[in-house]
Amino acid sequence: MVFSSTPFLFYFLPLFLICYYLTPSKFRNYTLLLGSIAFYSWGGPVFIFVILLTTALDFILVKQIEKSDSAKRKKLFLCISLFVNLGLLFTFKYLFFFITNLNHLLGWTNADPIRISPIALPIGISFFTFESLTYVIDVYRGDYKSLSSFKNYLTYILMFPKLIAGPIIPYNKMGWQIEGERIITPEMRLAGFMRFIFGLAKKILIANLLGETVTNLYKLAPADIDTLTAWVMAVGYTMQLYFDFSGYSDMAIGLGEMMGFKIPENFNFPYISKSITEFWRRWHISLGNWMRNYLYIPLGGNKGSIFRTYFNLWIVFLISGFWHGAGWNFIFWGAYHGFFLVCERLFLKNFLQKNSAVMYTFIVTTVGWVLFRNTSLHVSAMMYKKMFSFQFSQQHAFDHRFIAVLCIALFFAFSGLIKPFYNATQNDEQLFIQNKIRLYSLYAASLILFIVSASYLSGQNFNPFIYFRF
């Protein structure tokens, strides 16, 4: 079940919210937990048992970590948890990739290949695995106490707004909200509803419309793709990916707010960044924070030599790329961004500070997204050849509607450069109290967007969420 679907919008969500609001506040976690189990079971009824079992094991191991006085025993329980969580992630997501590549190597020696079939991937496994690790590591470090009950921990992991595509919320930012009494004000419900609708519109009215055309363009024969078409495809996917994932994050944040939760922001106008370094502070913020706090800093961060700092950056972005998918294209994509981060630290930093570098960042990220989209390196190589061959034709396979939607997407993606517009997008509940004109305007706009989005949804066959496969 996806947020931008008829079953979710018109059946699951209304029924869940009615039950949630009617439930006394001290029992709402039960309603949220049952609703989350039902939500996940809709698309993966078998895999819900995988989550339940690993979550139960983690809860027991963390309790043992907290009770143990021996540093060795604490480390042992930590290692068991890491082995189980990362082992399951490896088995479901990466085992087939490694065996396939091993078989290529065995083919050079004429050895018999290892037979293995593709393994079905539990939806959102990368996201809930990373959240499980934050819980275990935070308690192991002594930064926070463990949750008081298994029910509360299970609610933290399974909370459906962020379960299958993030944001990745550290235990230390969510645990106290789950265990404490949440006060849901009318302003929070209204702000959350509007945020959800704006995210829904980003997904249906921009990402889907762009994605359908981009998908069709990729079906063209290479001979029918000239330089303009190749760049339109690349920029179109750049916008599709942003509005798809940021739209989902907006919906998750809105749903959380309607339920009394404060879910951290996951995007902050990434395409107005003036460097790749800044881009990664604005894009998929929750993943960037996770990589910094649980990987980059433990590796030594920038505390060691310059060589060690650059090595740590490369390792982090290689892993970040591989986290997104079991494919060489993701590894090369991570290395690509790691290369530019190192270059910016070495010699590009001063140049970028003295010049308007927004276009530099946008071009670098757009070129990188070509690798991200195509699991076939051959297709990516073809695209790069077309993008930089500077050969133009008179015929193009995209229409005026696609170009209009693309222009709208570009405007909103770069609207953070306009200060009044940027300020107007900031989520501040007090504005819903202090500024009635803005309140009624946003409320009317959200209702119109919902009606238009629902209308488009009923006639669309193209409705994927890109990050579901991660």
Image (cartoon, rainbow, N blue to C red):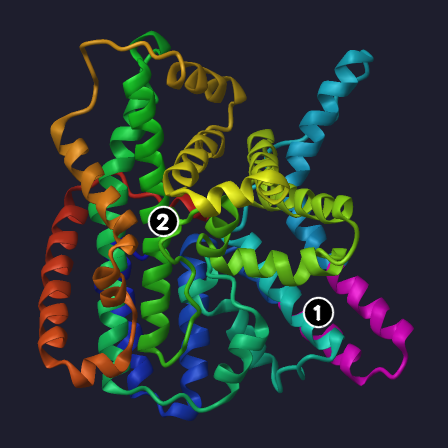
Q: Kindly identify the residue that appears in the image at 32 percent across and 41 percent down.
A: 240
Locate residue 214, reporting x and y percent: 30, 29
Along the viewing direction, whichever of 293 and 178 lies nearer the viewer: 293
Viewer-side residue, 461 vs 413: 413
What amino acid is at disc 1?
A: Ile
Residue 68 sits inside the magenta stretch: yes
Q: Quadrant of residue 61?
A: bottom right
Instruction: Tell me the element at label 2.
Output: helix
Please tell me how crowded label 1 is: few (under 14), some (14-19), or many (20+) other residues with Cα within 10 Å.
some
Q: Secondary structure at mark 1?
A: helix
**Residue that carries the numbered disc 2 in the rendered image:** 272
Magenta-drawn segment: 55-82
Instruction: Find residue 252 and report its horizontal and vertical position in percent.
Output: 37, 64
**Does the magenta stretch mainly form a helix, a strand or a loop?**
helix
Q: Quadrant of the N terminus?
A: bottom left
**What is the quadrant of residue 395 in the picture?**
top left
Sequence-wise, which precedes: disc 1 or disc 2?
1
Where is residue 217 shown, x and y percent of the image? 29, 22
Q: Which residue is mark 1?
A: 137
285 sits left or right of 465 in the view: right
Q: Does residue 86 appear to the left or right of 27 in the view shown?
A: right
The answer to whether residue 50 of the structure is visible from this angle is: no
Check the image and report above or below for 211 versus 66.
above
